[in-house]
Amino acid sequence: MVLPAAFPNALVNGISGIAVGMASSMPPHNLGEVIDATIPRLRNKGTALEPLMAACPGPDLPTGGRHRRRWDPQGP
């Protein structure tokens, strides 16, 4: 369960769990990047996805993981 917070706690700290018999995991993200993406969204609810993705490009991957290819928000 994720409760309301002053900042997106689940995104910053990461979460893992099991839902409908499938394990899922969301790695932690950098707090500064998440705040940089949250502020424009709070000021303008119609903010497009691209500026948010530029401010918060991806997880921190504290275990040393690497992105193998760039994610395209428009699809494959």
Image (cartoon, grey):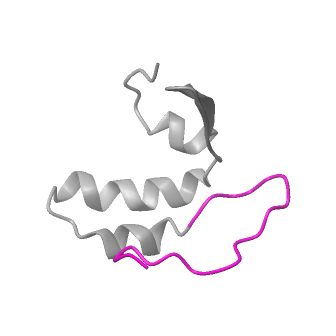
Residue 54 percent coordinates (x, y): 45, 75
Where residue 24 sits, quadrant-wise, is top right
Quarter holding the C terminus?
Answer: bottom left
Viewer-closest of 43 and 13: 13
Where residue 44 sits, quadrant-wise, is bottom left
Viewer-closest of 38 and 29: 29
Residue at 34%, 76% in the rendered image: 50
Main SS class of the magenta portion in the image: loop
Relative placement, left or right, of 9 versus 51 is right
Relative placement, left or right, of 57 versus 43 is right
Residue 73 percent coordinates (x, y): 39, 73
**Is 51 covered by the magenta stretch?**
no
Residue at 37%, 24% in the rendered image: 4
Does 64 sit above or below residue 70?
above
Viewer-closest of 1 and 6: 1
Residue 60 percent coordinates (x, y): 69, 58
Relative placement, left or right, of 34 versus 52 is right
Residue 39 percent coordinates (x, y): 33, 56
Number of numbered discs overlaid on the protein picture: 0
Which region of the structure is painted magenta? Answer: 58-76
